Amino acid sequence: MQAANKITIIGIGYKPFDKKTREIILGSDVILASKRLLEVFQGYEEFEVVRDKVSVLNNISETIEFIRNNYKTKKIALIASGDPMFSGIGRRAVEEFGKDALEIIPDLSSIQTAFARIKEPWDDAFLISLHGGPEPAKRRRLPYGIQDIPYLVERHNKIAILTDRENNPAVIAKVLSLSPVAHSLSPMLYVCERLGYEDEKITEGPSEEIAGMLFSDPNVVIILSSQSVSPAVKPPSITFGLVEDEILHSRGLITKDEIRSVTIHKLRLPQAGVFWDIGSGSGSISIEAARLFPGLKVFAIEKNTEQILNIKKNKIRFEASNIEIIEGVAPDVLKELPSPDRVFIGGSSGQLEEIISLLTKKMFSGIAIINATKIETLAQATAELQKAGFRVDMSQVSVSRTKAVDNGNFLSALNPVFIIRGTKNGEKE
């Protein structure tokens, strides 16, 4: 039996093809490239030999569909930019076709090349992508957004950023120039334009200067801070047991330490999977869960703008990159999220019935925890979970803390909290 064809993804932009890559290119039935990469490919000596095999597809979905319909009968080479596995099409191809169907031949990455151009080591750099993809309507959610850059600069004195037309160097620089914290670190920006092209250009300057300039695509931004990161902003080395003062929050609105520990214990979080933290507030539950289980994808859902900012800062400070922040009101913003394995509801904005109903529609199987301070919420949560087919149990947690008064210590009680747990389909209670 003839072996199935491999889909070969070939990175280009910086080096000539080696012997193996040249043979694959010459032996391909179809060579797929975007309009921009066709321009780059035309500079390779092999192009004239294979030009009749080249097909230009700018739409990623169209490219994936073409490959799916043809790779079993045709030898397909897909031209990619730089290293396809560094924020490139390689990830999507693996998701669509599986590792066994692919052969990936990388070139240098644009980040690697950019650091070489400015002669700066990059083994200690923090790397992020702000490249949301070429289709605005289908932009993928990114771990960090452009508004997070000032807080990242506070944590890392060397950052490299993959940009796009929306998140461009001038916009990045403007966000930095308006941040008092970032400004105090005197970051220097390097904009590396059109790397690998004949007209490549490196521009260096402070954020205020870069913010007023225009740059050609594609480009990469490197940020170097003149000062080392302060030890005060380094995250605690402990894995679990953060105290309230370590987690940035507003007006005392945070799940108290003792309640947080019981809640996380009752969630029985898996090593990997999806966790929804609905009404996440400052993100204290999300932060603890994400640090305990790096393989867990945590969605922190919150509607309050002030709290969203707190979650972003906490996510960066505690290096919890497996948290994705979703701004909006549940259940509306939950509908497009992947189905969860665990759910915590710390706040529902009066939509508790609708949220639990959505879990039923998503065929939820796992553990859902609802924390409540009101008896009415306890009654509603219990009733709604039971109506949706959950097995329900409840704990009431009362916490008193020592408080110094005059020459002695007394116990001062916090508000008691009801922890309602709903389980479905075999999960242990």
Image (cartoon, grey):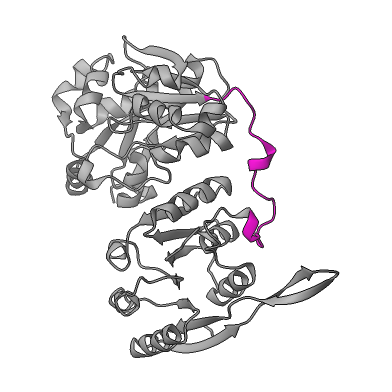
Give the image location of residue 411, x and y in percent.
74, 77
Q: Residue furthest right?
A: 407
Q: Residue furthest front?
A: 406
Give the image location of residue 170, x and y in percent.
35, 24
- The C terminus is located in which quarter? bottom right
Q: Residue furthest left?
A: 52
> From what the image shows, is residue 202 above or below residue 187?
above
- What residue is rendered at 51% in x and 89% in y? 393
Q: Residue furthest top?
A: 198
> From what the image shows, is residue 396 above or below residue 192?
below
Residue 233 magenta-drawn?
Answer: yes
Q: Nearer the viewer, residue 18 or 87?
A: 87
Q: Is residue 61 left or right of residue 18?
A: left
Give the image location of residue 81, x and y in percent.
33, 29
Q: Is residue 239 visible?
A: yes
- What residue is rendered at 28% in x and 27% in y? 25
- What residue is rendered at 53% in x and 69% in y? 269
Q: Is residue 70 left or right of residue 87?
A: left
* Image-quadrant location for residue 238: bottom right
Q: Nearer the viewer, residue 206 or 11?
A: 206
* Image-quadrant location for residue 36: top left
> From what the image shows, is residue 331 above or below residue 27?
below
Segment colored magenta: 224-245
